[in-house]
Image (tube, rainbow, N blue to C red):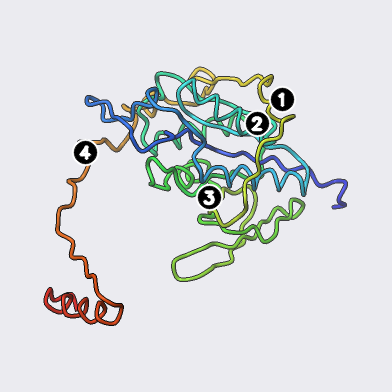
Amino acid sequence: MSPQEVPPLHVIVCIKSVPDTTQVRFDPETNTLLRGEVASIINPFDMYAIEEALRLKEAHGGSVTVLTMGPPQAEKELRDALAMGCDEAVLLSAREFAGADTWATAYVLSQAIRRLGEYDLILCGKQAIDGDTGQVGPGIANQLGVPQLTYVSRIAAIDPAVRTIRVERLLEEGREVVEAGLPALLTVMKDINDPRYPSLRGLRAARRKEIPMWTPVDLPDCEPENLGLEGSPTHVVKVFSPPQREGEATVINEPPEAAAARLVDLLIQERVI
């Protein structure tokens, strides 16, 4: 196949709107986050997914569609992604989606991706800072039946003609190089790039862009029993802050050598060493 015959890439980026603070409150009845009470931002790990999608578009041509499920105000985060350079955005927002756990969230996102049609890659951040589960990306891949490449720190090569991708994964014990066929889903690490800032032109274009809002009616294959809080297999029993640690501190005000010797003595007394 000649370069002229290679179709352009269609990359889908799934992002999440997260609280821009650690001071969050929960609904005492449902144990779900009260998102309307705090300012929100794009999940920081998802910024790297957006940037990598834009770099792929610049290198190979094509388009980037950004997708999120959340309350109506999550449109702001979609416009931020459009301002960075994404081409299209879709907001999944309905009362039926509220309270979804990671499984139900992945279910809805996968249904939306099916409606979007042909795609080559799905990119997600490795995890969200409010939940820290890292489950939604792999859950989407499982729902769609596509390969999942997690903890990706570098895309080593991608061949749209042969339909393959090779990536480098960052693991605790080292790095791993993996190759898979397209379409595939990647969850990316912050090592992969440095996200760009939106341009003034991008900000203006993002303000004018029409963003469709999809509900269950727009996802004809969605089964109502799989949506929202009722469709979530996991349920939060209780949300609480751990008790504050208590203890005493010993300050050693002595010259460095004497302080080091004194510290060793104290550690031995406490049977730490």
Amino acid type, callout 1? Ala
Percent position of residue 55, x then y: 71, 47
- Residue type, label 3: Thr
Query: Do labels 3 and 4 touch, CB within 8 Å?
Result: no
Disc 4 crowd, CA 10 A, few/some/many (<14, 14-19, 20+)? few
Q: Secondary structure at mark 4?
A: loop
**Residue wearing tag 4:** 240
Q: Where is residue 258, by image quadrant?
A: bottom left
The quadrant in which residue 76 appears is top right
State yes or no: discs 1 and 4 in contact (Cβ < 8 Å).
Answer: no
Give the mark, 2 or 1, whose residue is nearer the N terminus. 2
> What separation in Å lies between label 2 and label 4 (alpha carbons)?
36 Å
* Label drawn at residue 28: none
Q: Which residue is mark 1?
A: 205
Quick one: label 3 or label 2, which is nearer the N terminus? 2
* Few, some or many residues within 10 Å of mark 2 (<14, 14–19, 20+): many
Above or below for 93 versus 248: above
Check residue 82 in the rendering and tell me which mark sits there, or answer none: 2
Closer to the camera: disc 1 or disc 3?
Answer: 1
Q: Mark 3 — residue?
A: 187
Q: Say what secondary structure mark 1 lies in.
A: helix
